[in-house]
Structures are given as C-alpha cells and as structure tokens.
Amino acid sequence: MKNRHLDQILMCTVYVACKVLQINLTFQEIMKCYRNQPQSTSNIYRNVLLHVDKDGVEERGDLIKFYNSVYVKVIQKFANKSADGRREPLILTPLPVSIQGQ
C-alpha cells in the first residue's frame, strides 16, 4: 500500500469492514461522505495509483478500480479471517502466535 493516500486506504477499509459486518453501505455512499469532508479533493478518488511498471510508468484509475484490482488482493485473506472471526476471536495485533497465547 506504499504511495497511497491515507484517505484512499481508509475508504477501502470502511467498505471492507461493512462487508465483513454485513452492513449495507455502498462504495458510492462512502465516497459521498468523503466528499463532504473539509479535506476532500476529487483527485483522491479519481486519480489513484494502480500500478507502476518496471520503466516507472504509472497506471492510474478511480478508487473503485483500485479497490478491485489492488486492495482486494492485499486484504482478502485478512478480510476472510475477519468474517470467520464470529466463530473464533479475531486478534488485531501483529504479535507472534506464541506471545498471543500467554
């Protein structure tokens, strides 16, 4: 998630959390709330870094394309584990397993 704006990551995270918690909130609704914030700029959700090739050429797109092509690939395993957390406790710290059990 290097070179990403924090607001982009937060909007994607809110969307994933809503999906995991089964809260009916669309990405468009999240972006609408973002647009009402004083620090918001359309560049944050319309011009998102998707990929940089080996020659340094950047591919950019909107936030939803970023979510589908980049963010989901990185967060999918954790999100699935979070969804399963209803059956077993979800540990939110990056501590090694041996320390968590103590």
Image: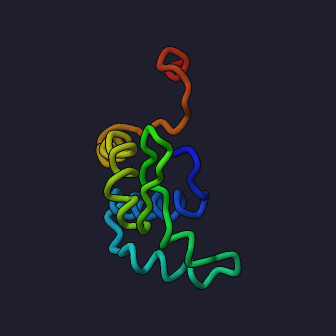
Q: Position of residue 24 (x, y in %)?
A: 33, 74
| Colour scheme | rainbow
Q: Count how many numbered circles sit on residues in the image.
A: 0
Residue 56 vs 93, above or below: the answer is below
| x and y, in percent, of residue 74 in the image | 39, 43
Residue 84: x and y in percent read 29, 43
- Residue 13 in the image: above or below residue 55: below
Left or right: where does residue 26 sit relative to residue 56? left
Of residues 52 and 32, the one drawn nearer to the viewer in this rendering = 52
Foreground of the two, 97 or 3: 3
Quarter occupied by residue 50: bottom left
The structure residue drawn at horizontal position 37% and vertical position 67%, both measured from the top left corner, is 64
Judged left or right of residue 50, residue 69 is: left
Instruction: State the image coordinates of residue 101 (x, y, percent, origin top left).
Output: 49, 20
Check the image and name the residue furthest to the right. Answer: 38
What's the residue at 61%, 57% (across, down)?
A: 6
In percent of the image, x 32 and y 58: which residue is there?
Answer: 68
From the viewer's perspective, is residue 12 above or below residue 28? above
Residue toward you, 52 or 98: 52
Outermost residue to the front = 55
Quarter containing the C terminus: top right
Q: Residue at x 58, y 49 (%)?
A: 3
When the figure is inspected, residue 89 is found, relative to residue 6, above or below; the finding is above
